[in-house]
Structure formats: structure tokens, C-alpha cells
């Protein structure tokens, strides 16, 4: 946005929209505990200032925070409802955060472990469903990670400098 429009206004608008979505996600996720408690949790998280710190910057901080909150909300909702939509939401948002910033690698690993634990401890799932979810986690994680590593290596080789190509 900054390079196209020569302004921070599009970035500020995007970050503001992401902040509004994050706050609503937190409220809706904890709504099953009660509306008042959900409101209190949401207000406490908002008072932390995470949604406002970099609202005018063009760093990827808001996008990473959005993916982390989306994955946590998906995980909590999957644990409480067992709907597979929340499983996929949590899974793909973990990878979205990882692709946005490599620093979230440990969050990705811990999120995948948490998804496995939720699937294994869910008593409503039979063994066939549990095997499907775990197979999906391992196979898609492997495919996505290998594709990302291949794409990044290929991109650096084709577009990068001599140092990126590893010329010796």
C-alpha cells in the first residue's frame, strides 16, 4: 500500500480492520463461557494494546497476530464444538502465520501438537475420525512445508544474488 498509494492510509485501514476482526473473534470464541465473562476477557486483551501498537506501520506484526489469534480461536472452538471447520481454520491459520513470519515456527509446532492432543482426547470421535485428522495433520504439514522449502529455494536460486546461489 505504501509504495502503490504513497501513503500509510491503506495500511492503517487494513490494520484497523484486522484489529476489529481479532477483537470480535476473541469475544465470539469465549462467548460459550457467558457473555459477561467473554466481554471482560475481550476488554482485558484490548487493554494490553497489542492491536494498537503498530497500527500505522507497514510491518507484518498485525497480520501475524491475526493468524495467531485466528488459530487459537479455531483451536478453542474445535475443542468445544468438535466441528471440523474449526480444525481446518486453526491448521491453515497456523501455516499462514508461519509463512508470514518464520519466527512463528515454534507457535506452528506447538499449535500442531495442540491439535493432535485435542483430536486424541476428543471422546466423540471414533478411531477412524481420529486417524483421519492425524493423517491430515502429518501429510498436509509435510506437503506444505516441502512445497514452501522448494519454492523458497527455487526463488532464491532464480532471483537471488550470487551469494544466494551458493557459488563456490
Image (cartoon, helix red, strand yellow):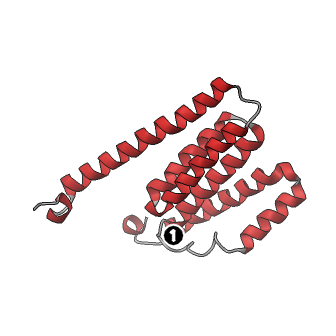
Residue 15 % position (x, y): 57, 65
Q: Of all residues shown, which one is farthest toward the left?
A: 168
User: For mark 1, what is the residue?
Assistant: 9
- Asked which secondary structure carries label 1, the reply is helix
Q: Is residue 28 above or below residue 63?
A: above
Q: Residue at x 70, y 41 (%)?
A: 78
Image quadrant in which you'd find residue 22? bottom right
Q: Please give left or right for residue 164 compared with residue 136 in the image.
A: left
Q: Of all residues shown, which one is farthest toward the top?
A: 128
Q: Residue at x 27, y 52 (%)?
A: 153
Instruction: Report whether residue 14 is seen.
Output: no
Relative to the observer, which residue lies in front, 79 or 71?
79
Relative to the observer, which residue lies in front, 121 or 159?
121
Q: Is residue 52 above or below residue 19?
A: below
Instruction: Report whether residue 119 is seen.
Output: yes
Residue 161 % position (x, y): 17, 63
Q: Please give left or right for residue 87 compared with residue 32 in the image.
A: left
Q: Residue at x 20, y 54 (%)?
A: 157
Q: Residue at x 40, y 71 (%)?
A: 6
Q: Is residue 136 above or below residue 94?
A: above
Label 1 environment density (alpha carbons within 10 Å; few <14, some 14–19, many ≥20): few
Relative to the observer, which residue lies in front, 10 or 47?
47
Q: Is residue 139 above or below residue 44?
A: above
Residue 77 % position (x, y): 73, 45
Relative to the observer, which residue lies in front, 155 or 127?
127
Amino acid at each position: 500500500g505504501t509504495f502503490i498509494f504513497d501513503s500509510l492510509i491503506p495500511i492503517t485501514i487494513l490494520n484497523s480492520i484486522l484489529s476489529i476482526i481479532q477483537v470480535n473473534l476473541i469475544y465470539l470464541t469465549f462467548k460459550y463461557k457467558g457473555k459477561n465473562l467473554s466481554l471482560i476477557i475481550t476488554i482485558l486483551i484490548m487493554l494490553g494494546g497489542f492491536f494498537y501498537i503498530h497500527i500505522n506501520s507497514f510491518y507484518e506484526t498485525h497480520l501475524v497476530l491475526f493468524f495467531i489469534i485466528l488459530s487459537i480461536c479455531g483451536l478453542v472452538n474445535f475443542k468445544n464444538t468438535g466441528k471440523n471447520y474449526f480444525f481446518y481454520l486453526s491448521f491453515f491459520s497456523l501455516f499462514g502465520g508461519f509463512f508470514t513470519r518464520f519466527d512463528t515456527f515454534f507457535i506452528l509446532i506447538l499449535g500442531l501438537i495442540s491439535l493432535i492432543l485435542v483430536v486424541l482426547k476428543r471422546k466423540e470421535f471414533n478411531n477412524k475420525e481420529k486417524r483421519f485428522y492425524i493423517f491430515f495433520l502429518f501429510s498436509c504439514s509435510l506437503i506444505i512445508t516441502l512445497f514452501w522449502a522448494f519454492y523458497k529455494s527455487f526463488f532464491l536460486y532464480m532471483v537471488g544474488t550470487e551469494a544466494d546461489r551458493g557459488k563456490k
